[in-house]
Amino acid sequence: MTEPTGKPSRTLKPVGDATREPPDLAALLGRVARGDQDAFGQVYELMSRPVYGLALRVVRDPAQAEEIAQDVLVEVWRKASHYRPERGSATSWVLTVAHRRAVDRVRSTQADRDREERTAAPSPDYDEVAEEVGTRLEHQQVRRCMRGLTQTQRESITLAYYGGYTYREVSELLGVGLAAVKTRMRDGLIRLRDCLGAQP
Amino acid sequence: MTHDPHDLAGPYVLDALGDTERRRFEHHLPRCAACADETAGLRETTTWLALAVAHRPPDRLRARVMTEIARTRQSPPPLGRRLPSPRTGGLSRLAAAACLVLALIGGGTTWHFHRSAEHAQALNRRVTAVMTAPDAHTSTARAQTATITVVSSRSLGEAVVTTARLQRLPPAKTYQMWWLGPTPPRSAGTLNPPGRPRPLVTTGLGNAQRFGVTIEPAGGSQQPTSAPILTVALG
Ligand SMILES: [Zn+2]
């Protein structure tokens, strides 16, 4: 019994805060939690690109990224009833699962040589991947706002989020104290939030 | 040495903590409204970082995933939880706002107000209104003897005042709050003997430029009879 609720596959809007959550995803998750496979198909349309793109950016290997994306999306199916709206947006929930999974993978399976490679190229090339029309808006906004950070804020965030490094590793890579790295991550994110949040 | 987890929100939302630290911070989160609120906010920011690198997966992935879910049993909702319902919001933000003020007045002493539903519910509705007003402005002043934080909203004409480390006064004396400038001082009420710090609401903000606290005879005065022990500029 499928009710004609929700519009499928609207362009995914960036999520600045809870009130700008695309209504679709949280509502879709509610249906998915009840076993609605059609709803899950729509979740796939909304989230497969961010999930796959993020995994690809972190592990830098298409085959592994595909595996991770599949695991994450199946996890979303399995755990849809665990999503708690009061804790944050649905987009954020899915992408948190994806990021953790990708980071776990890169920490546990990457050979030392790969780690060294990643170490050798710590430049914030956060803009190297996305070329899709659907993500251009988010991409442009993030790139613009990234420019507003100090270099060490940008490097700290990039190495941690896209590189999968712990803040202790970031501290070593950048030759900066632990406290300073923590502060730069936090301050950089706050500055990003203020910049991105100013968008309509 | 004291372990201070309050500065881990940034690394945490970036998944940049080691396992041990992550577990420790996740243990801390439900007990600290300041960290919980900061974490929730920063988490949404990292979502942008993910969206910025979105990339179309190979087409075969869809069929694989759909096949996989068709034979994957779903996990039931955690005990005591209904299936996802529309967002309610509000309450936790309020608790966090109050915590922010209290954390501010705690200053470097790391005094933290812990999150609890009762705490949030106990807050006066007017406190909420001021703290969540679009034009809410926060000012803090520290002196040797006390710290005061004022969250004021011109549009509401009210302010939420919190104090810390105020000395206990002899019974014949009281603290009194004032709206200062550009007109002669106007009383904003007296302050109860300090115990556990609690926000209070004062009205009559008007176009006052500063907020001050004096020590007055018990019952308060029409006009200040002594120099303020603290003043704070208003937004
Ligand atoms: Zn904390």
Image (cartoon, rainbow, N blue to C red):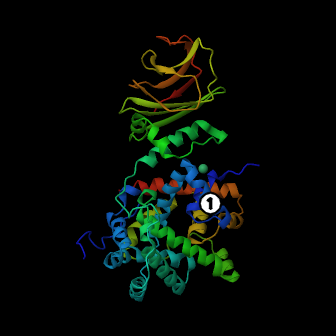
Which image quarter is the C terminus of chain B in?
A: top left
Q: Chain of mark 1?
A: A
Residue B71: image x %, image y %? 42, 85
Residue lying furthest left: A4
Residue B112: image x %, image y %? 60, 43
Amino acid of disc 1:
Thr
- SS class, disc 1: helix
B167 relative to A71 in the view: left or right: right
Of A65 and B163, nearer the camera is: B163
Q: Residue at x 48, y 79 (%)?
A: A69
A61 relative to A176 in the view: left or right: left
Q: Which residue is mark 1?
A: A152
Q: Residue at x 60, y 67 (%)?
A: A160
Looking at mark 1, is its residue's CB closer than 8 Å to ligand 1? no
Residue A130 visible in the current orientation: no
Residue B139: image x %, image y %? 51, 34
Residue A166: image x %, image y %? 65, 67
Residue lying furthest front: B80
Indicate the quadrant where residue A115 lies.
bottom right
Of A11 and A108, nearer the camera is: A108
Indicate the quadrant where residue A84 lies.
bottom left
Of B28 and A179, nearer the camera is: B28
Note whether A83 is above or below B123 in the view shown. below
Of A144 and A130, nearer the camera is: A130
Note whether A129 is above or below A183 in the view shown. below
Q: Residue at x 42, y 87 (%)?
A: B64
